[in-house]
Amino acid sequence: MFVVCLFDFADRAVFAVLAQTIKVELRLSDFQLGLLQGLAFAFLYALLGLPLARFAEHASRLKIISACTAFWSVATLWCGFAQGFIQLAVGRIGVGIGEAGFLPAANSLVGDRFPRSRRASTMGLIMLGTPAGILTGALIGGHVAEIASWRHAFFVLGVPGLVTALLVVLLLKEPARGLMDSGSTKKTPAPDFPAFLKALRAKPALMFIIAGGAMAGFGNTSISQFLAVFLARVHDMDVRETAAYYGMISATFLTIGLLVGSFGTDWLARRDARWPAWGGAIGLSMAPLIYFVAFNTQNITAATGLLILAGSFLMIFYAPTSGMIQNLLNPRMRATGIAIFAMLYTLVGSGLGPTFIGFVSDVMSAIAYNGDFAVDCPGGVARDLSDHALVSACHVATSLGIKRALMVAVCVFFVASLFYYLASRTLREDFYSPEKDDSASQGVN
């Protein structure tokens, strides 16, 4: 599952790190980049996540993961052939469709393999595929783009995903459902969707966690999809240097945040079960303050350290969120619960976040430019590349635009922090227990 997660995020990262290069060659606006990294990816990801999760409550989760991995790998290959915005959008939609099936099924597998006290830390280990994938996608993407082209980078990363899809069905074994919670391997029918909604309404902590995670996703995805663009513009980096810094920063803070968030909150939860929610609230309240300083620091070494620190605080929320959702729900509802979380995280975060950043960046760039930005700097690139004064003016405007847009986006972390604090108030009372929840559950499919 770690390797699947690695290629999941490598295929996302390669687009993020090459976004500025693709933008210049295809003359795309920041808003179009935001759509490609946001709604084009997120819409069907969110739309199909729930049906695939409901299917995972009944069918083989490993076969679902294998099929989805193959699908998004083919879509990654397609992006390498794209000649314009529409074709790129089709490829990004395909990546979103494929990746929709991974997270719910993987969380359901973990819930049946490990007890409550180890689920967050186990998911943390699997999700270490996120920084590994981002580093892999960034370094390979940047290197291949430098020596060949950005198109070849998509080809190089798409093929190994197909191999991984085959290995999933050949090497892994499906665990029995519910063993870790009931002690029995007896097959029971999955509760229907109305029963899930009833459980959701009965658990305020679950609703606050899902809402808080979605808001955190808005800021998190905005940063991850436009950090490479920020580094390229504000710190004047070429594609290989941008890729190296983006990969190193993202991989480092994701690793620290996932490990501290998963193992740290699992350890603290032995003393008080509310620590997974408290940890998320603390991290999300600290992150924006550090990001404000990082985005306005001119020295690249200092900015790198601050971006890593801010991201580490931010990512404390992620692994405990998956663990809490599993611990709050019936074993046969966990894939659905994660899918609901992933759907909102994707729509609000991956869908609206980058799209919002791209729109605000275009607006802020136009405000910062002394003249008609749309005419003089189409797609953020000077109309006349031989006019050095115009090239410089367009560059300064787009640099200010992306910086100000990111500073606006991180303010959402304060709202997310409040939701995690509110979840902590009833978290212990809302945890799943077979005696309480199963007897209250109505309606089975």
Image: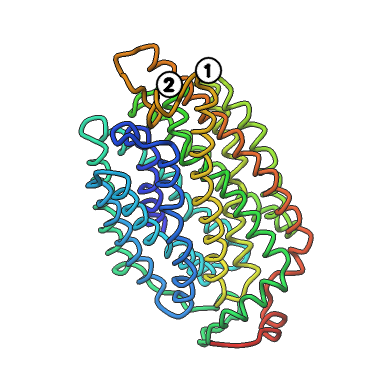
Relative to 46, residue 283 above or below: above
How far from the left and from the top, in percent, is residue 191? 57, 83
Which comes before the other along the chain, label 1 or label 2? Answer: 1
How far from the left and from the top, in percent, is residue 151? 24, 41
Relative depth, front residue between 8 and 21: 21
Q: Residue at x 60, y 35 (%)?
A: 310
- Mark 1 → mark 2, Cα distance in angstroms: 22 Å
Q: Nearer the viewer, mark 1 or mark 2?
A: 2
**Mark 1 is on which residue type?**
Asn
* In the image: residue 8, left or right of residue 427: left
Q: Inspect this view and state whether residue 251 appears.
A: no
* Residue where numbered disc 1 is placed: 299
* Residue where numbered disc 2 is placed: 394
> Residue 379's mark?
none
How far from the left and from the top, in percent, is residue 83? 24, 44
Q: Dividing the image into 4 quarters, which one contains the N terminus?
A: bottom left
Q: Residue at x 47, y 26 (%)?
A: 398
* In the image: residue 28, left or right of residue 193: left
Relative depth, front residue between 272 and 333: 333
How far from the left and from the top, in percent, is residue 150? 27, 37
Mark 1 is surrounded, within 10 Å at the Cα level, by few (under 14), some (14 to 19) or many (20 or more) other residues, namely: few
